[in-house]
């Protein structure tokens, strides 16, 4: 499987515009998780984990607090998750996850990203079977056996554990996300480099120069859309 799951964000520029997009994305997700499960992180483990990720991404505290306060108010927008799949340049595959308050608008915007770059949007499930949906945790450590034993003792459905450059990466069932984090924390892990649920391709593809240029344009259009939360693909970068 390798560490190529990081590919999906490798092309994202560290600009002020991109930071604003990251803040907006986290704000929307925090609002939804706090609204559905409660605004108290102690009683809402999903929110606690999300806040940890937001702080790691250097989301300002005022952005976080505003999203939680908005959820406490009870009103506001009703966002729903939406997933779109399709074929990118050079036969590449893409999965786009969104949070939207207007599915028709979001579908139209995502479809435009495909058509503008001569790509083809597919139906749900058209490419997802070429990905694995997994909870991914990366942390400092080298003892794969100890990590595997801790996760098995916690009854976690483990897909794989990899070791590279002094770090371990555990791939587990997405339904065991919180159980996995709890078990790893109990064995002494205090900080996670990655703690996300991701779509990881089962195989990667390499693109020629022309297709890569079109692919970067395709990703750029998607990243500019407010409703887009995550973009996954199988392109070797």
Image (tube, rainbow, N blue to C red):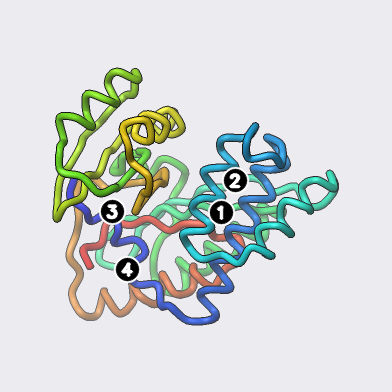
Q: Residues within 10 Å of mark 3 (few under 14, many from 20)?
A: some
Circle 2: element type = strand
Q: Position of residue 209 (x, y in %)?
A: 20, 80
Nearest-to-viewer mark from 2 and 4 = 4
Total labels: the figure holds 4
**CA distance separating discs 1 and 4:** 19 Å
**CA distance separating discs 3 and 2:** 22 Å
Quarter occupied by the N terminus:
top left
Query: Which residue is disc 2 drawn over?
Result: 81
Nearest-to-viewer mark from 1 and 3 = 3
Query: Which residue is disc 3 drawn over?
Result: 5
Which residue shows up at 41% across the image and 40% down it?
Answer: 125
Query: Which residue is disc 4 drawn over?
Result: 10
Of pointers 2 and 4, the one earlier in the residue sequence = 4
Query: Which residue is disc 1 drawn over?
Result: 98
Of pointers 1 and 4, the one earlier in the residue sequence = 4
């Amino acid at each position: 499987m390798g560490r190529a799951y990081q590919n999906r964000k490798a092309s994202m520029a560290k600009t002020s515009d991109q930071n604003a997009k990251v803040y907006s994305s986290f704000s929307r997700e925090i609002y939804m998780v706090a609204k559905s499960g409660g605004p108290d992180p102690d009683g809402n483990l999903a929110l606690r984990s999300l806040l940890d990720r937001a702080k790691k991404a250097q989301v300002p505290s005022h952005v976080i607090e505003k999203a939680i306060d908005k959820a406490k108010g009870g009103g506001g927008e009703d966002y729903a998750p939406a997933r779109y799949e399709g074929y990118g340049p050079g036969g590449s595959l893409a999965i786009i996850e969104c949070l939207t308050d207007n599915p028709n608008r979001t579908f139209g915007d995502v479809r435009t990203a495909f058509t503008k770059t001569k790509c083809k949007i597919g139906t749900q499930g058209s490419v997802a079977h070429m990905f694995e949906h997994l909870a991914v945790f990366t942390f400092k450590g080298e003892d794969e056996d100890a990590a595997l034993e801790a996760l098995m003792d916690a009854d976690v459905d483990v897909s794989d554990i990899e070791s590279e450059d002094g770090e371990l990466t555990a791939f587990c069932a997405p339904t065991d996300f919180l159980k996995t984090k709890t078990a790893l924390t109990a064995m002494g892990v205090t900080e996670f480099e990655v703690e996300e649920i991701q779509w990881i391709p089962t195989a990667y593809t390499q693109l020629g120069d022309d297709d890569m240029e079109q692919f970067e344009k395709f990703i750029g259009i998607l990243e500019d859309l407010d409703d887009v939360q995550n973009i996954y693909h199988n392109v070797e970068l």
